[in-house]
Image (spheres, rainbow, N blue to C red):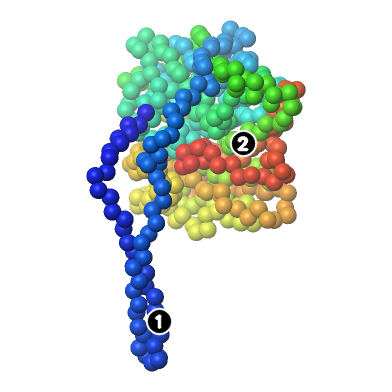
Amino acid sequence: MGLKFNTSPLHQTTPTSCKTKVTPTTSNKVKKLTIENKKIKMPESDILDISSQYETDSKITKIEFHSYTPHTTSFKNNYEILKSVYQFNKRMFIRKITEAGKVLLSNNGFSYLFDQIRLEINGIEVDSTRVLDITSSLKGYLSGTPVDYYCYENAGWTFKNNTKSTNNAGEFSACIPLKYWLGLFEDLKKILVNSRLELILTRSHSDLNALNVKSEGSATTGAVTLNKIVWKVPHITVDDEERLKLLKLVEKEKSLFIPFRSFETFEYPELGTTTKAVWNLKTASKLEKPRFIIVGLQKDRKNQISKDCSVFDKCDLTNVKVFLNSIAYPYDNLNLDFNKNNFSILYDIIVLRKKIRNPLLSPSTFLENAPIVVIDTSKQDNSGTASSVDVQLEIEASKPLTGVSAYCLLIHDRIVEYVPFTRESVPNKSAPGGARKPVETRACQRALSQ
């Protein structure tokens, strides 16, 4: 909580301002200046409201975190892990690494243990994240700040302090806020009423991307054994007055809306021997036009235990451009040249133009760990009649892109409607009144700015 300091002013003066008026004289060449002094009327301030009544906020009487475990007890590769609750927030792992003396968990290694996460409300899928490992890495580099880095470290991020997530026996636990994985959990700041939630996790087919061989080791394989997965869910209890209001809302069968920004990642396994690749990503509906596009490249890292899969490569990149129908973003070419240390425009786009005062990445760590491209497409003309948007990506490099994989993360708007009375959910709805309201979320401002 912040500290408030109240002081009693001993002397206060009312400032004055000078208002200048130009009055022409009979001569067209000479003008007379008349200066009028006028007092400024100061508005009343809260510091003068000394008769206000003391108020207490007791609408919420209790907040308890309940633990929910999956329906299955087997967490092997390629398995689906299902959890059901009636109301949500974080999740926790407890596990062990085999061959702990030879391998370590890589940076953000917990996310690389899963391929996909899905969230269902009342049996309807409302949000999901594919390619979970790359998605969380791209977003995490952009969302984090030094202030909350230790929260990231508790979730398995170790690149900055070069720490370990395990003990000498390879045992560890982690607590991962679901906002790192799903846009809905980052943007939803209100309770859900009379709804059933299901969280589905799909284990990756291999644990190699989550592991790194030790510097003195020569291991070629490794595995992670999950012993327990828990979903920590906050349950909120309200006082009688608020309970009555909520019951009346449910009885009215009123539709409630959840606006948020969803993460959608596309993978191009290998760009080929060309120096310019054209990638037709998708045809998006007008309601789900991309607001931010993040592009990262990796070379020969997938399923290579000797390399850190959370690190992105420069790959002699020179330019990236996105086309939404016929409109290009950004307007100018980037004209990158990493060999000549010409990359500052990328860092400027991420940090300075998004007004992140305290970014997680410095220019040097940005170049070393995440030389990624962020393209802002949030300012668009919505007056057009087109009902869909073709999203195309162009990638140019100074050398052939042999062995290079491309990943593109789209952050787009989504609105979900649900009815507490009937427990019905409908994703991708327009805002009330028929017009789509802009979704201003913390995800947008923090994820890129963020």
Mark 2 surroundings within 10 Å by alpha-carbon count, few (fewer than 14), some (14 through 19), many (20 or more): many
Place of residue 425 in the rendered image (x, y in percent of width and height, measured from the top left):
71, 27
Place of residue 1 in the rendered image (x, y in percent of width and height, measured from the top left):
37, 28
* Image: 266 above or below 105: below
**Total number of numbered discs in the rendering:** 2
Q: Please indicate whether residue 164 sits to the left or right of residue 235 in the image.
A: left
Q: Which mark is residue 145?
A: none
| Cα distance in 3D space between marks 2 and 1 | 56 Å
Residue 189 in which image quadrant: top right
Q: Please indicate whether residue 177 sits to the left or right of residue 269 in the image.
A: left
Residue ranking furthest to the bottom: 27
Considering only order in the chain, which callout, 1 or 2, is on the residue closer to the N terminus? 1
Place of residue 263 in the rendered image (x, y in percent of width and height, measured from the top left):
58, 35
Say if residue 93 shows up in the picture.
yes
Q: Which residue is mark 2?
A: 259
Q: Secondary structure at mark 2?
A: strand
Amino acid type of the residue that numbered disc 1 sits on in the rendered structure: Thr
Q: Residue at x 59, y 36 (%)?
A: 260
Q: Residue at x 69, y 26 (%)?
A: 249
Q: Secondary structure at mark 1?
A: strand
Residue 7 in which image quadrant: top left
Residue nearer the viewer, 123 or 156: 123
Residue nearer the viewer, 313 or 28: 28
Q: Please indicate whether residue 3 sits to the left or right of residue 390 in the image.
A: left
Q: Which residue is mark 1?
A: 23
* Image: 279 above or below 258: below
Please report contact status of discs 2 and 1: CB closer than 8 Å, yes or no. no
Q: Residue at x 62, y 48 (%)?
A: 392
